């Protein structure tokens, strides 16, 4: 029995050491990149590169505690967050936030809506979304995938995503046409400005 336990500990220790030595870069590339990296353009999962660190931490905590559901991939994102420690969340968020906004390859995607109308409608969003505003933890929207933008706005509208009552109120007032115009406008703008 003792032998079995010692053998078990001996086999786990190197793994634990490996987990501790895991750099946030490796962690991201092994566990997140397939859905959030530069080769995930054909998926609707959001672009994270250069996103605000405090926003990323809040979202990961919200997935972990069940405050925010994953409505796109059958709760895969929630399961991933539940397996992260608070330290993992902070370290990987710091790493993602440090990636250059400009480095994410721009992709031209066909999407309905009007840029001109989107620009006019976006002025009310700018007080919170133009630049990172530490007061409100609002994410960067420029250069986000348009289908993800539409998904996020619809999720707030339907209150299936209710981890931000403030955004539920903002989205409630939008028509389907507004949602498309805004999604087109924000996603078509360069991510780095
Ligand atoms: C199998 C695909 C998949 C993998 C792997 C994955 N995610 Fe996600 N992630 C998603 C999807 C899908 C969403 C959006 C869910 C929704 O909005 O309904 C999401 C959303 C997020 C968000 C919220 C972004 C925003 O703009 O609100 C963060 C932060 C995030 N993921 C971080 C991570 C991290 C960190 C990892 C690696 C530890 C990871 N994800 C691995 C699919 C994935
Ligand atoms: C008063 C501040 C404020 C205003 C005005 C505002 N937002 Fe937000 N928005 C936020 C905050 C804060 C969040 C983060 C919510 C969370 O914690 O999940 C957010 C989140 C979002 C998201 C989710 C992004 C993601 O990556 O999942 C979208 C999309 C969005 N806002 C679009 C808009 C649009 C479009 C407008 C204008 C019609 C708007 N917002 C107006 C504060 C604001």
Image: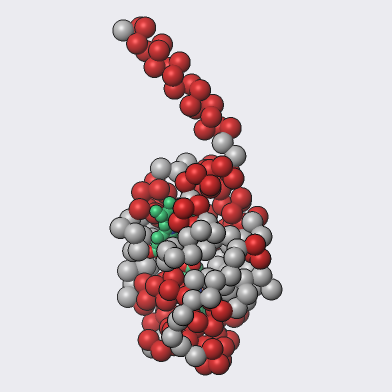
x 40%, y 48%: residue:
80
Above/below status of 137 relative to 82? below
Q: Nearer the viewer, residue 127 or 180?
A: 180
Residue 98 appearing in the image: yes
Residue 115 at x, y = what percent?
Answer: 54, 89
Residue 170 at x, y = what percent?
Answer: 45, 80
Which quarter of the figure has residue 158? bottom left
Q: Nearer the viewer, residue 111 or 71?
A: 111
Residue 8 at x, y = what percent?
Answer: 39, 17
In which quadrant will I find the N terminus? top left
Q: Nearer the viewer, residue 27 or 79?
A: 27
Above/below status of 18 relative to 61? above
Which quarter of the figure has residue 193? bottom right
Residue 86 appearing in the image: no
x 56%, y 79%: residue:
188
Above/below status of 23 relative to 165? above
Residue 31 at x, y = what percent?
Answer: 47, 46
Left or right of residue 87: residue 35: left
Which quarter of the figure has residue 132? bottom right
x 37%, y 76%: residue:
154
x 40%, y 12%: residue:
7
Left or right of residue 193: residue 155: left
Left or right of residue 57: residue 100: right
């Amino acid at each position: 029995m003792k032998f079995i336990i010692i053998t078990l500990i001996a086999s786990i220790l190197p793994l634990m050491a490996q987990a501790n030595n895991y750099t946030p870069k490796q962690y991201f590339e092994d566990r997140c990149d397939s859905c959030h990296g530069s080769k995930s353009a054909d998926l609707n999962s959001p672009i994270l590169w250069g996103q605000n660190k405090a926003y990323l931490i809040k979202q990961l905590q919200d997935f972990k505690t069940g405050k925010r559901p994953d409505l796109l991939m059958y709760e895969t994102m929630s399961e991933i967050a539940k397996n992260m420690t608070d330290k993992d969340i902070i370290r990987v968020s710091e790493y993602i936030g440090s990636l250059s906004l400009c480095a994410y390859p721009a992709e031209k995607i066909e999407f309905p809506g009007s840029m001109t109308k989107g620009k006019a409608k976006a002025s009310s969003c700018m007080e919170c979304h133009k630049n990172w505003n530490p007061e409100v933890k609002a994410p960067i929207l420029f250069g986000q995938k348009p289908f993800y933008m539409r998904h996020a706005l619809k999720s707030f509208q339907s209150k299936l995503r209710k981890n931000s009552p403030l955004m539920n109120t903002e989205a409630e007032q939008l028509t389907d046409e507004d949602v498309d115009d805004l999604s087109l406008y924000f996603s078509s703008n360069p991510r780095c400005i």
